[in-house]
Amino acid sequence: MREYHVRICERLGVRFPGPTRQLSHHRWHGGMRDGLTERRLDKLAETVSVDRRTVARWRGWWLGGFTTTPFWRAASGSFMPPVAPARLPAALLERFAGDAAEQLIAFLSFLGPITGGASMRAF
């Protein structure tokens, strides 16, 4: 599984500072698709070795901060029917075709312009 995640990161050109934390895309995808319950929050926090507050902060960003970015305001019009903001990031992930791994790769590629570098200047 680790080799698979490394290949995804290499294909996307993703770079992580410090120790890389591996996340099972199936667990991540399932939690996003089905909603974040207290039990899933605990399991997700344990899986990625971060505090529950960090996961809650990530969720807050998806539900509030992300939807106000120039990137999302420009990109959201590409989806018909519109993506339900209250269901982010699950509602966005579901829009990409393929199995869970292919959806995750497409999802991360879509988010590429807001991950830093020269492309950020456009947004």
Image (cartoon, rainbow, N blue to C red):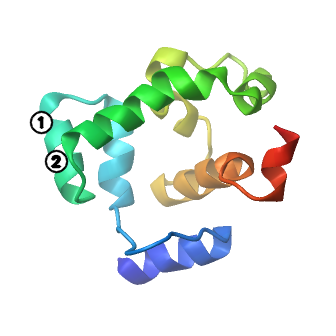
Residue 12 appears at what percent x and percent y?
Answer: 66, 67
Residue 48 appears at what percent x and percent y?
Answer: 27, 58
- For the C terminus, the quadrant is top right
Q: Residues within 10 Å of mark 1 (few under 14, many from 20)?
A: few
Residue 62 appears at what percent x and percent y?
Answer: 49, 30
User: Is disc 2 in contact with disc 1, using a CB cutoff of under 8 Å?
Assistant: yes
Please tell me whether residue 21 is drawn above or below residue 55 in the rendered image: below
Please, what is the three-letter code of the amino acid marked with disc 2?
Lys
- Residue for badge 2: 43
Q: Is residue 18 visible?
A: yes
Question: Which quadrant of the figure has residue 117?
Answer: bottom right
Residue 101 appears at what percent x and percent y?
Answer: 49, 60
Label 2: state its secondary structure: helix
What is the number of the mark on residue 39? Answer: 1
101 vs 108, nearest the viewer: 108
30 vs 122, nearest the viewer: 122
Question: Which quadrant of the figure has residue 105?
Answer: bottom right
Q: Residues within 10 Å of mark 2 (few under 14, many from 20)?
A: some
53 vs 10, nearest the viewer: 53
